[in-house]
């Protein structure tokens, strides 16, 4: 079963990597970019029927730093 | 307009970060994980009506290294 975990910095947490990319896009001449935030995507291939609670535990224990990051777990055919 | 760019290593490109996470999950006692791949998520806030071709150009010029990475661009209300 394919699972996609998206990890983002919480709102209000400074994202210097995002600012650098924003600045670089403007330097390349791309106008109209208002904000850029960089996060992580973790794609897991887990056993079918893995409990969603187990996936949440994986995120809380390892995949995300919940002090400064939020995570969302996506499963299904559209990923 | 919110845009989400997902950048993944191409199939066949070694992903040491993913292997490390895989190994760590097993060490924490999570069984049944078959594969882990790590990618980047870039969330952009761009002007409404930005041409999809412009977004593709941003990815090719800056956001992804197309020698070793693939990218997908997602727009719409579900992101």
Image (cartoon, coloured by chain):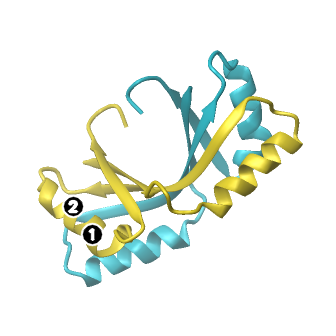
Chain colours: A yellow, B cyan
Q: Nearer the viewer, residue A52 or B8?
A: A52
Q: Residue at x 36, y 58 (%)?
A: A70
Q: Quadrant of residue A65?
A: bottom left
- Circle 1 residue: A60
Indicate the position of residue B27 as horizontal and vertical percent values: 28, 84
Q: Nearer the viewer, residue B1 or B22?
A: B1
**Can the viewer see residue B66 in this picture?**
no
Q: Secondary structure at mark 2?
A: helix
Indicate the position of residue B44 as horizontal and vertical percent values: 60, 38
Q: Secondary structure at mark 1?
A: helix
Q: Is residue B76 left or right of residue A58?
A: right
Q: Nearer the viewer, residue B33 or B42?
A: B42
Q: Are marks 2 and 1 on the same chain?
A: yes
What subunit carries mark 1?
A
View extreme (front): residue: A12
Q: Residue at x 41, y 63 (%)?
A: A69
Above/below status of B22 relative to B7: below
**Can the viewer see residue A13 in this picture?**
yes
* Tag 2 and tag 1, C-beta contact below 8 Å: yes
CA–CA distance between discs 2 and 1? 6 Å
Indicate the position of residue B47 as horizontal and vertical percent values: 66, 24
Q: Is residue B46 left or right of residue B6?
A: right
What subunit carries mark 2?
A
Above/below status of A55 relative to B22: above
Q: How many marks?
A: 2
**Is disc 2 surrounded by few (<14), some (14 to 19) or many (20+) residues within 10 Å?**
some
- Circle 2 residue: A56
Rendered image: mark on residue A9: none
Indicate the position of residue B14 as horizontal and vertical percent values: 58, 65
Q: Residue at x 22, y 60 (%)?
A: A55
View extreme (bottom): residue: B27
Which quadrant, please, contains the C terminus of chain A? top left
């Amino acid at each position: 079963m394919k699972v996609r975990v998206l990890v983002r910095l919480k709102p209000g947490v400074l994202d210097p990597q995002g600012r650098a990319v924003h600045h670089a896009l403007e330097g390349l001449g791309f106008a109209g970019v208002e904000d850029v935030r960089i996060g992580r995507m973790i794609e897991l291939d887990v056993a079918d029927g893995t409990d969603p609670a187990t996936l949440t535990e994986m995120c809380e224990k390892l995949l995300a730093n919940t002090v400064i990051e939020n995570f969302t777990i996506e499963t299904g055919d559209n990923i």
